[in-house]
Amino acid sequence: MHATWFYSTRFLVRENNVFDEGSLSYEVFRRYLRYFDVLTVVGRRLEEDNWLNMKYSSKASGPRVDFEFLPSLSRFDYFRNYRAVARRVSELVANSDVVIARLPSEHACKAIHCAARQGKPVVVELVGCAWDSLWNYGSPIAKLYAPVAFERTSRGVRKADCVNWVSKEFLPRRYPAPRARVKTSISDVQLKDEIGAAELVNLRNLGRLAAQPCLLPEYVTRRMACVEAPRTIGLIGSMKVAYKGHSTAFRALKLLSERGYNHRLRIIGAGDPAPWAERARREKILDRVEFGGNLASGRPVLDWLDDVDIYIQPSRQEGLPRALIEAMSRGCPAVGSTAGGIPELLSPECLHQPGDHARLAELVERACVDKPWRDQLIARNFLVSLDYFDSILDPRRDSFWSEVAQLARLSRAQESAKTSLAATA
């Protein structure tokens, strides 16, 4: 069977290999190949001169995965490119047994519309809120388009045969799917088991680990053994957008500096750091901010997190943040905003309202002076992260995608039967 995956993300082609500007590696696409013979990935193409900014990004190409690049539908490109995109999307859908639409995305919305007209089964992977991402994007045009994108995304979810929300509460509540035959809430985060599947299950069954730190992995107990106050704050977030909370982090860091704390803020993520460095200079904290560029997902990010004392996620919009889950899996004490699915990961006492830099500073300060609380966060965060390891998520993913594949086979059989009847009529 042939599945076609639609998303408006950008890929770069270099030396016959395809690279993603985010975290969509071949390992992610290979999940689908357990259920489909071929996967066509549809996105946009990034220009060659962006290669230097992507040298640490993920390789997306591999066996049984092919790529199709469509023109942009962003802003004014929408009117110029719409007809050509609509025609090609219709052709791609016609050659597919199932459409996988990752939302929010203009290309994915168009694919859902074409699939509905052609009677093809649709799977929606909802990874974020269209309204929040555009409203907090940072431009007046984005704010104007936010209600349109919200309605288009909502309509796409309502039309879907199968839906996977990456958060358990926030996205299903905001984007219900009354028509879907198969529904689930599975994060697209994929954490590799480093402690063994059996040990992982035992740890999850313990419930509370704070009283039994000896059962925790060494990289977690090492944090709890440290008596020094946290000095390094970590933040992972794309610098191409305004909604990851960089400005909130800067103001909190300035406030902490005024209170006599000597923290350093380390930031990694795709995009040009120059505008944010200028913002840090205006806040008079540039000497305390370190921009580490873009790291490949997996081990490089985990190693970076091991050198971070406390992790912050001060976003203005989120689905379920991969970076926060990765930080929790390394035992980082973490605090974050109430945006999106973050409250599903962190306890209420670790949250602040989006943009509330004073509260963020208070939370970081408490982690410095209250070691028992900090140790409690370390153990709790690691325990919560266990729900996102491969051995826990894979059975749930397999159940969902097995039902999707069965639906696709049934749909193809029905289509073949109709074709045969038409030929004999």
Image (cartoon, helix red, strand yellow):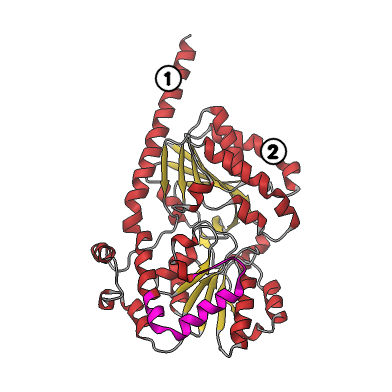
Q: Position of residue 412 (x, y in %)?
A: 43, 28
Q: Is residue 407 visible?
A: yes
Residue name at image x 50 percent, y 85 percent? 231
Residue name at image x 26 percent, y 76 percent? 212
> Is residue 13 found left or right of 200 in the rendered image?
right
Residue name at image x 46 percent, y 87 percent? 229
Q: Which residue is mark 2?
A: 84
Whether the residues at callouts 2 and 1 have beta carbons within 8 Å, the answer is no
Residue name at image x 39 percent, y 31 percent? 409
Corner quadrant of residue 14: bottom right
Determine if the magenta segment contains residue 419.
no
Magenta segment, which residues? 351-376
* 8 lies above or below 159: below
- Magenta stretch, overall SS: helix
The type of residue carrying mark 2 is Ala
Q: What kind of element bears circle 1?
A: helix
Q: Nearer the viewer, residue 113 or 134?
A: 134
Q: Which residue is mark 1?
A: 417
* 348 lies above or below 5: below
> Is residue 321 found left or right of 191 in the rendered image?
right
* 114 lies above or below 46: above
The type of residue carrying mark 1 is Ala
- The 10 Å Cα crowd at callout 2, few under 14, some 14 to 19, many 20 or more, is few
Q: Position of residue 64 (x, y in %)?
A: 45, 46
